[in-house]
């Protein structure tokens, strides 16, 4: 891990932060003035800081000037500005230059460490995103359903209109949002601005308002500094609101107001804050049904539903599974520093017949598991993970296996360069999903039962019931991103029942 750079002419401040961060296992490097920092950035082997913590007023230079120069060279490095209370106006103005947060002096040591930890996490997320973007194609897909999505992204590339992305969990909604951002026009709220993502279902209701809109110092217990919310962080770029269907009803009102007039108030604040942000929302839920149930505001739904893109589940684009599997195996191999493994034809056919309730994310996880756990370079059917082997393959749905492709042909599958502004209308993207015939899984169940009975297996009834329960629960948890109460509700069982079953079946 790269060190935390501390810039302050006060030796006591440097000493206190060095010791506190060292106890937390965070490496540091200290400087007394900005010119030393700039010289360190010019070092031949200098990798730069993980996070920069700088005083605002120092002999030989200003922390704000240093902020500008660091952001020009290393735009992804979070910068925390330390300031005395008399400098708060200057510190707040630093946000316009891209400061991550400010730290008022005198500061509480645990609060300072927690702030720096949060900046480290943000820095690491940016590094991972940059590595993935550099090493991987934007999106892969030859299936007609994905080609419709690509064409829609192309047609939207000249507009900053609000977009609502619908699709099952794990189908790649954030990838589509990032593609929309990347291919949006440059300028205000365009591709040259930041892309900020937040999962509204993953943050407790009491914290979500502060996450979205920020808070003023003293707004609530523990609010020791002013904090910018995601809307301010995304100013001039794109804010991706994932799982918007789970947003609490009272916060929907505040979101509607921001979308309507482009301004909001921080928690505990009295001055309106303006944000020029393009909003892209996503959900796996049926928002029309949520509106009818009174769980989602109808006016907010219409405000978000300007253009709707439906992202197909993986079972509707099985012909893409071979290319995706090869890509994820290569990606996992790069991450682990090993040679990429290859799927034998029979293993690939079995994998392509799997239902993938967790969609593309589940395929990615399986490929990472295979990279670690498969004993040989060529992956056979017996090497596949238990969840794939435990489920009978859908033979009729397995695609013909395409030969390995070189880099040139793989490049032709990328989103970039595949757009056709005169192609099919956007309505093609939101066609109803293809139904899977019930007879497929029923025949598969019958065949598995016949096999177990013919082989003399004991307690066939219990075996199949336990496996069926496991599949049902795993599918429900995948669709709710692990939220057990919601999964139980969707399955029509009690929350105590699902908890007991997860323990009995060894699923959690």
Image (cartoon, helix red, strand yellow):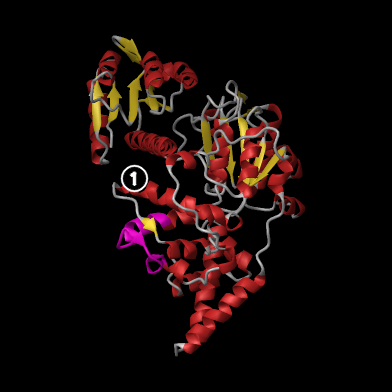
| Location of residue 76 in the rendering, given as x and y in whole percent from the top left corner | 41, 28
User: Residue drawn at (71%, 40%), measured in percent from left and top?
Assistant: 424
Q: Who is closer to the viewer here, 60 or 311?
A: 311
Q: Who is closer to the viewer here, 35 or 474?
A: 474
User: Residue drawn at (47%, 35%), measured in percent from left and top?
Assistant: 223
What residue is shown with label 1?
A: 334
- Give the structural element (helix, strand or loop) at label 1: helix
Residue numbers of the magenta segment: 367-385
Residue projecting furthest to the front: 403
| Location of residue 346 in the rendering, given as x and y in whole percent from the top left corner | 44, 65
Residue 463 in sight? yes
Dot 1 crowding, Cα within 10 Å, few <14, some 14–19, many 20+? few
Residue 267 in sight? no
Q: Who is closer to the viewer here, 176 or 278?
A: 176
Among the 4 quarters of the image, the one containing residue 399: bottom right
Relative to 220, 154 lies left or right: right
117 drawn magenta: no
User: Residue drawn at (62%, 71%), measured in percent from left and top?
Assistant: 440
């Amino acid at each position: 891990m790269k060190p935390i750079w501390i810039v302050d002419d006060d030796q006591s401040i440097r000493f206190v932060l060095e010791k506190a961060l060292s106890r937390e296992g965070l490496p540091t490097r200290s400087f007394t003035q900005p010119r030393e920092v700039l010289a360190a950035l010019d070092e031949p082997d200098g990798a730069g800081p993980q996070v920069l913590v700088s005083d605002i007023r120092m002999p030989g230079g200003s922390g704000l000037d240093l902020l500008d120069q660091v952001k020009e060279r290393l735009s992804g490095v979070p910068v925390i500005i330390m300031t005395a209370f008399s400098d708060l106006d200057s510190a707040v103005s630093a946000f316009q230059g891209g400061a991550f947060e400010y730290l008022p002096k005198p500061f509480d040591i645990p609060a300072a460490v927690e702030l720096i930890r949060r900046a480290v996490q943000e820095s690491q997320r940016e590094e991972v995103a940059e590595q993935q973007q550099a090493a991987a194609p934007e999106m892969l897909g030859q299936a007609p359903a994905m080609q419709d999505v690509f064409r829609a992204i192309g047609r939207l590339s000249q507009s900053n209109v609000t977009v609502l992305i619908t699709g099952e969990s794990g189908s790649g909604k954030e990838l589509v949002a990032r593609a929309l951002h990347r291919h949006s026009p440059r300028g205000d709220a365009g591709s040259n601005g930041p892309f900020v993502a937040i999962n509204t279902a993953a943050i407790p209701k009491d914290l979500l308002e502060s996450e979205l809109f920020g808070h003023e110092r003293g707004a609530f217990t523990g609010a020791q500094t002013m904090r910018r919310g995601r809307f301010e962080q995304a100013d001039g770029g794109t804010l991706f609101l994932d799982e918007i269907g789970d947003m609490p009803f009272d916060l929907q009102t505040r979101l509607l107001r921001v979308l309507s007039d482009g301004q909001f108030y921080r928690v505990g604040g009295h001055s309106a804050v303006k944000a020029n942000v393009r909003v892209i929302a996503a959900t796996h839920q049926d928002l029309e049904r949520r509106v009818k149930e009174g769980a989602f505001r109808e006016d907010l739904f219409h405000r978000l539903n300007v253009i709707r893109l439906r992202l197909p589940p993986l079972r509707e684009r099985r012909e893409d599974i071979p290319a995706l599997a090869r890509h994820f195996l290569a990606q996992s191999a790069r991450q682990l520093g090993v040679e990429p493994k290859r799927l034998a034809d029979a293993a690939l056919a079995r994998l392509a017949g799997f239902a993938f309730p967790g969609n593309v994310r589940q395929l990615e996880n399986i490929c990472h598991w295979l990279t670690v756990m498969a004993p040989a370079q060529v992956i056979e059917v017996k090497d596949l993970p238990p969840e794939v082997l435990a489920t009978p393959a859908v033979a009729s749905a397995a695609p013909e296996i395409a030969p390995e492709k070189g880099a040139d042909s793989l490049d032709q599958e990328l989103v970039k360069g595949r757009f056709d502004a005169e192609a099919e209308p956007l309505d093609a993207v939101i066609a109803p999903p293809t139904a899977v015939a019930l007879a497929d899984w029923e025949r598969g169940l019958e065949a598995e039962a016949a096999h177990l009975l013919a082989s003399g297996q004991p307690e066939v009834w219990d075996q199949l019931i336990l496996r069926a329960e496991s599949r049902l629960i795993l599918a429900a948890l995948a669709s709710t991103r692990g939220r057990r109460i919601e999964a139980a509700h969707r399955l029509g069982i009690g929350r105590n029942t699902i908890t007991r079953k997860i323990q009995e079946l060894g699923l959690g």
